Image: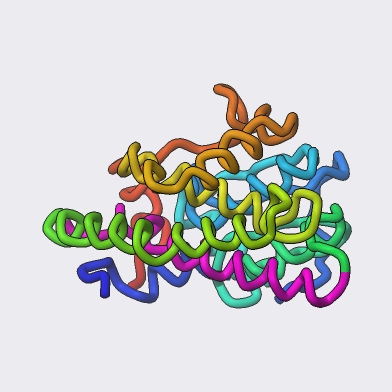
Amino acid sequence: MLQGTHTPGVLRKVFGGTHRNLKRGSMSGKPKLTYFNGRGRMESIRWLLAAAGVEFEEDFLETREQYLKLIQDGHLLFDQVPLVEIDGMKMVQTKAILSYIAGKHNLYGKGLKERAFIDTYVEGTTDLMQMILTLPFSPPEAKKKNLPLIIEKAKNRYFPAYEKALKQHGQGFLVGNQLSWADVHLLEAILMVEEKEPTVLSEFPLLQGFKTRISNMPTIKKFLQPGSQRKPQPDDKYVATVMKILKEG
Protein backbone atom coordinates (compact mmCIF):
# COMPACT_ATOMS: atom_id res chain seq x y z
CA MET A 1 0.00 0.00 0.00
CA LEU A 2 1.33 3.42 -0.92
CA GLN A 3 1.93 5.78 1.95
CA GLY A 4 2.41 9.45 2.72
CA THR A 5 0.31 11.32 0.16
CA HIS A 6 -1.23 14.68 1.00
CA THR A 7 -4.73 15.10 2.42
CA PRO A 8 -7.43 12.93 0.77
CA GLY A 9 -9.69 15.95 0.31
CA VAL A 10 -7.13 17.72 -1.86
CA LEU A 11 -6.31 14.61 -3.87
CA ARG A 12 -10.00 13.92 -4.55
CA LYS A 13 -10.28 17.38 -6.05
CA VAL A 14 -7.18 16.86 -8.19
CA PHE A 15 -8.01 13.34 -9.31
CA GLY A 16 -11.80 13.46 -8.92
CA GLY A 17 -13.98 12.52 -11.33
CA THR A 18 -21.72 12.56 -13.74
CA HIS A 19 -22.35 15.17 -16.17
CA ARG A 20 -24.85 17.99 -16.42
CA ASN A 21 -26.06 20.43 -19.04
CA LEU A 22 -24.81 23.98 -18.61
CA LYS A 23 -24.62 27.10 -20.72
CA ARG A 24 -20.91 27.83 -20.39
CA GLY A 25 -18.89 26.48 -23.32
CA SER A 26 -16.41 27.00 -26.12
CA MET A 27 -17.43 29.44 -28.84
CA SER A 28 -15.42 27.44 -31.40
CA GLY A 29 -17.41 24.24 -30.91
CA LYS A 30 -14.28 22.40 -29.82
CA PRO A 31 -14.30 20.58 -26.50
CA LYS A 32 -13.02 22.83 -23.74
CA LEU A 33 -10.93 21.33 -20.96
CA THR A 34 -10.57 23.11 -17.62
CA TYR A 35 -7.85 21.85 -15.31
CA PHE A 36 -4.41 22.68 -14.01
CA ASN A 37 -1.56 23.09 -16.50
CA GLY A 38 -0.34 19.56 -15.94
CA ARG A 39 -1.25 15.91 -16.24
CA GLY A 40 -3.46 14.65 -13.44
CA ARG A 41 -6.72 12.99 -14.44
CA MET A 42 -7.11 15.31 -17.41
CA GLU A 43 -4.16 13.77 -19.23
CA SER A 44 -6.04 10.59 -20.14
CA ILE A 45 -8.81 12.78 -21.57
CA ARG A 46 -6.25 14.67 -23.65
CA TRP A 47 -4.85 11.36 -24.86
CA LEU A 48 -8.24 9.99 -25.90
CA LEU A 49 -9.31 13.15 -27.72
CA ALA A 50 -5.97 13.27 -29.51
CA ALA A 51 -6.23 9.60 -30.51
CA ALA A 52 -9.69 10.34 -31.93
CA GLY A 53 -8.25 13.24 -33.92
CA VAL A 54 -10.34 15.80 -32.01
CA GLU A 55 -8.95 19.28 -31.50
CA PHE A 56 -9.64 20.82 -28.10
CA GLU A 57 -9.11 24.01 -26.15
CA GLU A 58 -7.75 24.32 -22.64
CA ASP A 59 -8.43 26.73 -19.79
CA PHE A 60 -5.84 26.41 -17.04
CA LEU A 61 -6.59 27.03 -13.39
CA GLU A 62 -3.94 29.31 -11.94
CA THR A 63 -5.61 30.81 -8.87
CA ARG A 64 -7.88 29.62 -6.08
CA GLU A 65 -10.33 32.37 -7.05
CA GLN A 66 -10.85 30.75 -10.49
CA TYR A 67 -11.56 27.42 -8.83
CA LEU A 68 -13.98 28.87 -6.28
CA LYS A 69 -15.85 30.78 -9.00
CA LEU A 70 -16.44 27.53 -10.90
CA ILE A 71 -17.95 26.08 -7.74
CA GLN A 72 -20.01 29.17 -6.92
CA ASP A 73 -21.36 29.34 -10.48
CA GLY A 74 -22.53 25.72 -10.20
CA HIS A 75 -20.13 24.35 -12.82
CA LEU A 76 -18.51 21.62 -10.65
CA LEU A 77 -21.13 19.14 -9.51
CA PHE A 78 -18.88 17.57 -6.87
CA ASP A 79 -16.51 20.55 -6.41
CA GLN A 80 -13.89 18.65 -8.42
CA VAL A 81 -11.96 18.95 -11.65
CA PRO A 82 -11.39 17.88 -14.41
CA LEU A 83 -14.14 19.71 -16.22
CA VAL A 84 -14.90 19.13 -19.91
CA GLU A 85 -17.43 21.11 -21.92
CA ILE A 86 -18.51 19.04 -24.90
CA ASP A 87 -21.63 18.76 -27.07
CA GLY A 88 -23.55 21.23 -24.91
CA MET A 89 -22.71 19.38 -21.69
CA LYS A 90 -20.42 20.15 -18.84
CA MET A 91 -18.93 16.88 -17.66
CA VAL A 92 -17.10 16.62 -14.37
CA GLN A 93 -16.46 12.93 -13.75
CA THR A 94 -13.36 11.49 -15.37
CA LYS A 95 -14.66 8.04 -16.24
CA ALA A 96 -17.94 9.44 -17.58
CA ILE A 97 -16.00 11.86 -19.79
CA LEU A 98 -13.73 9.16 -21.14
CA SER A 99 -16.63 6.75 -21.75
CA TYR A 100 -18.53 9.43 -23.68
CA ILE A 101 -15.53 10.30 -25.86
CA ALA A 102 -14.76 6.65 -26.52
CA GLY A 103 -18.37 5.87 -27.45
CA LYS A 104 -18.72 8.91 -29.68
CA HIS A 105 -15.51 8.28 -31.61
CA ASN A 106 -15.77 4.51 -32.15
CA LEU A 107 -13.15 3.67 -29.53
CA TYR A 108 -15.45 1.62 -27.30
CA GLY A 109 -15.66 -1.70 -29.12
CA LYS A 110 -18.49 -3.46 -30.92
CA GLY A 111 -21.19 -4.60 -28.55
CA LEU A 112 -21.47 -5.11 -24.82
CA LYS A 113 -18.91 -7.92 -24.54
CA GLU A 114 -16.13 -5.90 -26.14
CA ARG A 115 -17.08 -2.91 -24.03
CA ALA A 116 -16.85 -5.04 -20.89
CA PHE A 117 -13.33 -6.14 -21.82
CA ILE A 118 -12.34 -2.55 -22.61
CA ASP A 119 -13.66 -1.41 -19.23
CA THR A 120 -11.74 -4.18 -17.50
CA TYR A 121 -8.44 -3.26 -19.12
CA VAL A 122 -8.99 0.45 -18.57
CA GLU A 123 -9.71 -0.11 -14.87
CA GLY A 124 -6.41 -1.97 -14.55
CA THR A 125 -4.33 0.71 -16.23
CA THR A 126 -6.16 3.37 -14.22
CA ASP A 127 -5.14 1.65 -10.99
CA LEU A 128 -1.51 1.62 -12.13
CA MET A 129 -1.51 5.21 -13.34
CA GLN A 130 -3.21 6.47 -10.18
CA MET A 131 -0.23 5.34 -8.15
CA ILE A 132 2.08 7.36 -10.37
CA LEU A 133 -0.22 10.39 -10.49
CA THR A 134 -0.29 10.71 -6.71
CA LEU A 135 3.46 10.16 -6.27
CA PRO A 136 4.51 13.82 -6.76
CA PHE A 137 2.15 14.84 -3.94
CA SER A 138 3.95 12.57 -1.47
CA PRO A 139 6.67 13.64 0.98
CA PRO A 140 10.24 12.76 -0.11
CA GLU A 141 10.53 9.67 2.08
CA ALA A 142 7.22 8.32 0.82
CA LYS A 143 8.29 8.90 -2.79
CA LYS A 144 11.50 6.98 -2.17
CA LYS A 145 9.58 4.11 -0.60
CA ASN A 146 6.65 3.99 -3.01
CA LEU A 147 8.38 4.26 -6.40
CA PRO A 148 10.01 0.79 -6.22
CA LEU A 149 6.62 -0.64 -5.18
CA ILE A 150 4.99 0.90 -8.24
CA ILE A 151 7.64 -0.51 -10.57
CA GLU A 152 7.33 -3.91 -8.91
CA LYS A 153 3.56 -3.94 -9.39
CA ALA A 154 3.90 -2.87 -13.01
CA LYS A 155 6.37 -5.67 -13.75
CA ASN A 156 4.73 -8.43 -11.72
CA ARG A 157 1.01 -7.67 -11.75
CA TYR A 158 -0.09 -5.35 -14.55
CA PHE A 159 2.23 -5.82 -17.52
CA PRO A 160 2.17 -9.66 -17.36
CA ALA A 161 -1.62 -9.47 -17.56
CA TYR A 162 -1.53 -7.27 -20.67
CA GLU A 163 1.21 -9.39 -22.26
CA LYS A 164 -1.02 -12.45 -21.77
CA ALA A 165 -4.07 -10.60 -23.12
CA LEU A 166 -2.22 -9.62 -26.30
CA LYS A 167 -0.98 -13.19 -26.79
CA GLN A 168 -4.39 -14.74 -26.29
CA HIS A 169 -6.21 -12.23 -28.47
CA GLY A 170 -3.63 -12.27 -31.26
CA GLN A 171 -5.02 -9.24 -33.09
CA GLY A 172 -2.46 -6.57 -32.25
CA PHE A 173 -5.04 -4.79 -30.11
CA LEU A 174 -6.33 -5.59 -26.65
CA VAL A 175 -9.95 -5.91 -27.78
CA GLY A 176 -11.46 -6.54 -31.21
CA ASN A 177 -9.61 -5.78 -34.44
CA GLN A 178 -9.25 -2.01 -34.17
CA LEU A 179 -7.93 0.67 -31.85
CA SER A 180 -9.92 1.18 -28.66
CA TRP A 181 -9.83 3.24 -25.51
CA ALA A 182 -8.10 0.30 -23.81
CA ASP A 183 -5.14 0.50 -26.21
CA VAL A 184 -4.76 4.26 -25.79
CA HIS A 185 -4.93 3.97 -22.01
CA LEU A 186 -2.37 1.17 -21.93
CA LEU A 187 0.11 3.08 -24.06
CA GLU A 188 -0.24 6.09 -21.77
CA ALA A 189 0.44 3.85 -18.76
CA ILE A 190 3.47 2.22 -20.41
CA LEU A 191 5.06 5.56 -21.17
CA MET A 192 4.40 6.81 -17.63
CA VAL A 193 6.12 3.79 -16.11
CA GLU A 194 9.01 4.01 -18.58
CA GLU A 195 9.64 7.57 -17.42
CA LYS A 196 10.39 6.04 -14.01
CA GLU A 197 12.07 2.82 -15.20
CA PRO A 198 13.15 2.86 -18.89
CA THR A 199 13.81 -0.92 -19.07
CA VAL A 200 10.47 -1.98 -17.59
CA LEU A 201 9.31 -3.68 -20.82
CA SER A 202 12.49 -5.72 -21.31
CA GLU A 203 10.71 -8.97 -20.45
CA PHE A 204 7.53 -8.22 -22.40
CA PRO A 205 8.12 -8.56 -26.17
CA LEU A 206 4.45 -8.29 -27.13
CA LEU A 207 4.08 -5.08 -25.15
CA GLN A 208 7.20 -3.72 -26.82
CA GLY A 209 5.65 -4.36 -30.22
CA PHE A 210 2.33 -2.95 -29.03
CA LYS A 211 4.03 0.23 -27.85
CA THR A 212 5.76 0.73 -31.21
CA ARG A 213 2.65 -0.04 -33.24
CA ILE A 214 0.21 2.15 -31.30
CA SER A 215 2.72 4.99 -30.96
CA ASN A 216 3.01 5.16 -34.74
CA MET A 217 -0.68 5.55 -35.45
CA PRO A 218 -0.93 9.00 -37.07
CA THR A 219 -3.06 10.80 -34.48
CA ILE A 220 -1.13 9.36 -31.56
CA LYS A 221 2.22 9.96 -33.21
CA LYS A 222 1.24 13.60 -33.61
CA PHE A 223 0.28 13.83 -29.92
CA LEU A 224 3.67 12.41 -28.92
CA GLN A 225 5.58 15.07 -30.84
CA PRO A 226 7.09 18.11 -29.07
CA GLY A 227 4.74 21.08 -29.04
CA SER A 228 1.56 19.04 -28.66
CA GLN A 229 -0.94 19.44 -25.80
CA ARG A 230 0.57 16.48 -23.99
CA LYS A 231 1.85 17.58 -20.62
CA PRO A 232 5.29 16.88 -19.10
CA GLN A 233 5.93 15.04 -15.87
CA PRO A 234 4.77 17.10 -12.89
CA ASP A 235 7.44 19.14 -11.16
CA ASP A 236 7.55 20.91 -7.80
CA LYS A 237 6.08 24.09 -9.28
CA TYR A 238 3.04 22.22 -10.60
CA VAL A 239 2.49 20.49 -7.25
CA ALA A 240 2.76 23.79 -5.39
CA THR A 241 0.24 25.45 -7.75
CA VAL A 242 -2.28 22.64 -7.31
CA MET A 243 -1.93 22.65 -3.54
CA LYS A 244 -2.33 26.45 -3.41
CA ILE A 245 -5.50 26.36 -5.50
CA LEU A 246 -7.08 23.49 -3.60
CA LYS A 247 -5.99 24.42 -0.10
CA GLU A 248 -8.78 24.03 2.43
CA GLY A 249 -9.55 26.48 5.23
Q: Residue at left 65%, top 39%?
A: 214
- The residue lying at 55 percent from left, 69 percent from top is 80
Q: Position of residue 206 (x, y in %)?
A: 54, 46
- Residue 16 horizontal side relative to residue 113, left or right: left
Residue in the foreground of this view, choosing between 202 and 131 = 202
| Left or right of residue 243: residue 26 | right
Question: Is residue 129 shown to the viewer in this render?
Answer: no
On the image, the x and y values in percent for residue 113 come to: 79, 76
Is 32 in front, or is 223? Answer: 223
- The quarter in which the N terminus is drawn is bottom left
Q: Which residues are magenta?
A: 111-139
Whether 120 is among the magenta residues is yes
Would you say residue 54 is visible in this rendering? yes
Q: How many marks?
A: 0
Question: Residue 39's x, y, as percent?
Answer: 49, 47
Mainly helix, strand or loop, the magenta region? helix
Instruction: Reply above or below: 213 against 203.
Output: above
Q: Nearer the viewer, residue 170 or 224?
A: 170
Residue 159 image-quadrant placement = bottom left
Residue 145: x percent and y percent? 16, 60
Q: Is residue 37 magenta?
A: no
Furthest-left residue in view? Answer: 141
Quarter location, residue 221:
top right
Residue 170 shown left or right of residue 136 in the figure? right
